[in-house]
Image: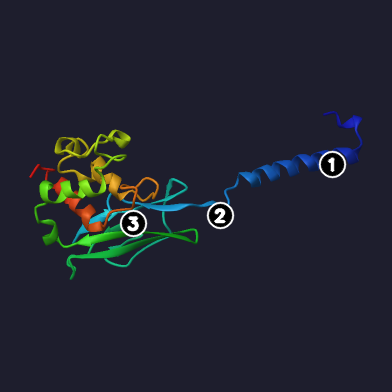
Amino acid sequence: MNTNMISPTIYRWFIFFCCSSLLIAACKNEPEENSILLNIEAPKLVFSEGDSIIFRLKANNNQVAADTWTTTIGNIDNSGNWIAPLHISADTILAMIVATYQNKQTSIQIQITKKAFQENTVSYALTIQPLLANNCNFSGCHGNGSRAGKVELSVYDNVKNNVIPFNADGSKLYFSLIKTNPLRVMPPAGKLHANKIQSVWLWIEQGARNN
C-alpha cells in the first residue's frame, strides 16, 4: 500500500483494524476450558488381587498426563499405574479411580475379585449359554434368526467366532460388555452385573471351551 496516497489518520485506522482482526481470530482458535471432556481408558474393568494396570487419561480424545490420580482401594502413582491389594476380605469389592486435569475430574469404577473366585472353572453349558440366552439370544438382537451387527450367539460355534481363547481383553464378546458409552454397551437394555461380566471374562481366559 502506498502510504503517500492516504491520510495518516486513515492509515492508522487501517493498521488498528488489521491487528484487531488477527487478535480476535487467535482468541477464537484457543480452546475454551469448559470444552474439555475427560475420560479414563482401561483395557478391562474386572481385576483380581495383586493385579496391576496403567490407566490412561484422555482430554477431547487426546491422551494427556493427569495432574493427580487417586483411588479408593489399592495404590496408584502419578503415572496412572494402579496396583490392586494383595488380599481382600469379600469375594468382590468395588474401587473408584479418579483423575484430575486442569481443575476437572473424571472417574471410573472397577471391580476386584478374589483369586480363589477366579480359579473356579466356568461352564459354557451352565453359565455362558444361559447368560447369553437371557440377555442376547432373541429376535432383534443376536438370536432367533437375528444377527444385529452381523453377530449371532445362539450356538457355541458362533459364540466362539467372537472370542479369542485365553485372551478375553482382546475378544469382541467381552469388549462389547464393558463399553462405557451407554449407547453402545451390550445388552442395550442395560449393562450386565459385574459378576456376570467377570464370568464371561474368566470363561474366555480359561480357553472358551464347550464344556
Q: Nearer the viewer, mark 1 or mark 3?
A: 3
In this view of the protein, which residue sits in the foreground, 175 or 87?
A: 175
| Residue drawn at point x = 24 percent, y = 39 percent | 143
**Element class at badge 3:** loop
Residue 152 placement (x, y as % from top left): 24, 36
Q: Nearer the viewer, mark 2 or mark 3?
A: 2
* Quadrant (top left/top right/bottom left/bottom right) for the N terminus: top right
Indicate which disc, 1 or 3, sits on the residue closer to the N terminus. Answer: 1
Indicate which disc, 2 or 3, sits on the residue closer to the N terminus. Answer: 2
Report whether residue 175 is seen. Answer: yes
Query: Could you say which quadrant of the image residue 76 lies in?
Result: bottom left
**Residue 195 circle label:** none
Mark 2 surroundings: few (<14), some (14-19) or many (≥20) residues within 10 A: few
Task: Give the residue number, with chain letter if any, for mark 1.
Answer: 13
Task: Give the residue number, with chain letter if any, for mark 2.
Answer: 33
| Residue drawn at point x = 24 percent, y = 43 percent | 137
Q: Is residue 154 left or right of residue 104?
A: left
* Quadrant (top left/top right/bottom left/bottom right) for the C terminus: top left
Q: Amino acid at mark 1?
A: Trp
Residue 147 placement (x, y as % from top left): 28, 35
Q: Nearer the viewer, mark 2 or mark 1?
A: 2
**Residue 80 circle label:** 3
Residue 9 placement (x, y as % from top left): 90, 41
Q: Is residue 43 left or right of residue 65?
A: left
In this view of the protein, which residue sits in the foreground, 41 or 22?
A: 41
Q: CA distance from mark 1 to mark 3?
A: 53 Å
Q: Amino acid at mark 2?
A: Glu
Q: Amino acid at mark 3?
A: Gly
**Element class at badge 2:** helix
In this view of the protein, which residue sits in the foreground, 72 or 66?
A: 72
